[in-house]
Every structure is written in C-alpha cells, then in structure tokens.
Image (cartoon, rainbow, N blue to C red):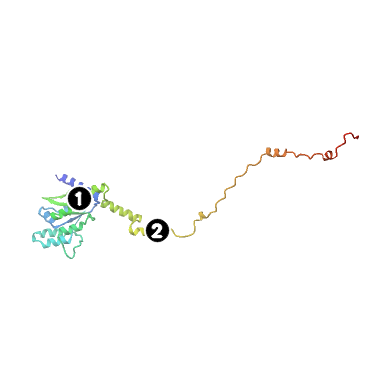
Amino acid sequence: MKIKRQKQAKKNISFYKYNFGFREPFQILIDGTFCQAALKNKIQIREQMPKYFMGEVQLCTTNCALKELESLSDDLYGAKLILQRYQIRKCKHSKEPVPASQCLLSMLEKTNPHHFFVATQDRDLTTGVMGIPGVPLLYIIQNTMVLDKPSACSLKHVEAAQLGELVSPTEQQSIQNLKAEQGLSKDGVEQQGKKHKRKSGNPNPLSCLKKKKKPMPQQPKKTDGEKRKRSRHRKRKPADLTSSVHPKPSGAQS
C-alpha cells in the first residue's frame, strides 16, 4: 500500500512539473493545522517530507500563521514550536495580521507564481486552493501524508493550454525570456531601434562606380569577293566627236 501511495505521489508531482514548471527544491507552505495533525499522528515532517517527495524540499510558513497559533489556546503550543522552525516567507500583512487561511491564499495570488505546495487541514483554505490552478494540496489522513490529485481547476487549465485557448505559466515565462533576448520587451524596443539604426555617412563606394559602356555592334567586314565585283565595273568611254561633227561626204575622194 505504501508503494502504491508513493507511485501516486510521483505521478502527481510529475503533473505539476511538466504543466506548471515546478522544480526542486519544492516549497511547502505549512500552516498550524497541519503541524497539529502531524504532532497528533507522530509524523516527523522534516524527516518524512523529503522522502515522500523524493527530492529536496523547503518548509516555510508566514508570520500570520504564527500569530494565529499564539492567539489560540495552549493546546496548540506544540504545533507552534514546530512551525517556528521553518522559514518565514514575507507576506503583505506585517502591520495587521490576518487569519492563516487568508494569508496563505494571498501568497498564492491568481496563478501560484512561486510554485508553493500547500500543507493544511483547514477546510476554508482547502476550498480556496481548489479554485486556483497549479496549487498542489497536501494533507494528513490518520498517520499518512497524502498529496491530493490535481484539482478540476488545474486539469481544466492544462486542457485549455493544450488546445491553444491560453498560455500556461511555464510558456509565458519562456515567451518573456525570448522577448528579452530578442529585445522585444518594452524597454528592449528602444534599445533594438538604437542598435540597428544606421548612421549617416559616405555613400557606398560600390554604388558610385561608373557604368561600363556597352560595346557597339561591329559591322561585318566586306569580303574579297565584294571588292572584286566593284573593281570589275568599267566606265563607259565617250563617243568619237570628230566623226559625228565632220562626217565625210559620200562621193569624196581620199
């Protein structure tokens, strides 16, 4: 049964890796209710969590979650001691603390950009997490940690991304990186224009070359036969004027 749960956990983690860009170390955002359940069921969170995720994890919480435990009864003192050992993520409620469920939901924003896993037993927080795509939910059943299967909201989001109706967070980040590399961002447009702007200078020397004149077609040379034909042409001799002007009398004696 333990092997089956681990395989299911590995499958769910792979879903968030390939569709929402989750990477190690996995950030586990924990509230007081999860620590109380772990204490009650004798679960060593710091020791068992890396084994369950089969990788490096970072256990973290918020000041609002700690303040909430301090304001409750002494029965949660042990959960408070456990929660104090984890890293504190800065929230927006430093001046006026809010309930832990509200604080953790604000850390997720609309698309969980920091890739938090949420570990809680709070029903209100669980309901809120189900409505945000790409938020893995972790809870305790009896003496076992369970990574819940992807919510309907996450599945719908991935399906829409595959159909081209929207871009997944991972693809959005890739597009932004490509735009930054190509200088297509808002700041990069001006830089690109300045970079590729041609300076005014001397004209291209190749364009200033004189065009070569095309040689005139040569007339065919006259052959020797044509020259001979013209040389054979004879001029007519003038007629004998003496015979025509002074004709001899018909009966004259020589």
- Left or right of 186 in this view: 210: right
Residue drawn at (16%, 44%), measured in percent from left and top?
4
- Decide which of 49, 210 is in the foreground and name it: 210
Q: What is the quadrant of residue 7 in the picture?
A: top left
Residue drawn at (14%, 52%), measured in percent from left and top?
139
Image coords of residue 22 (percent x, y): 24, 52
- Left or right of 189 in this view: 68: left
The circle drawn on residue 242 is none
Asked if residue 102 is positioned above or below residue 219 in the image, the reply reads below
Tell me which numbered mark, 1 or 2, is placed earlier along the sequence. Answer: 1
Q: Amino acid at mark 2?
A: Lys
> Crowdedness of circle 1 by 10 Å Cα count: few (<14), some, many (20+)?
some
Asked if residue 226 is positioned above or below residue 177 in the image, the reply reads above
- How many marks are shown on the rendered structure? 2
The circle drawn on residue 195 is 2
- Left or right of 60 in this view: 220: right
Q: Amino acid at mark 1?
A: Cys
Image coords of residue 184 (percent x, y): 34, 56
Image coords of residue 201 (percent x, y): 47, 60
Residue drawn at (36%, 58%), measured in percent from left and top?
189
- Decide which of 35, 201 is in the foreground and name it: 201
Secondary structure beneath dot 2 equals helix
Viewport quadrant of the N terminus? top left
- Decide which of 212, 53 is in the foreground and name it: 212
Q: Nearer the viewer, mark 1 or mark 2?
A: 1
Image coords of residue 243 (percent x, y): 84, 38
Secondary structure beneath dot 1 equals helix
- Decide which of 226, 131 is in the foreground and name it: 226
Viewport quadrant of the C terminus? top right
Q: Which residue is under mark 1?
A: 153
> Crowdedness of circle 2 by 10 Å Cα count: few (<14), some, many (20+)?
few
Q: CA distance from mark 1 to mark 2?
A: 45 Å
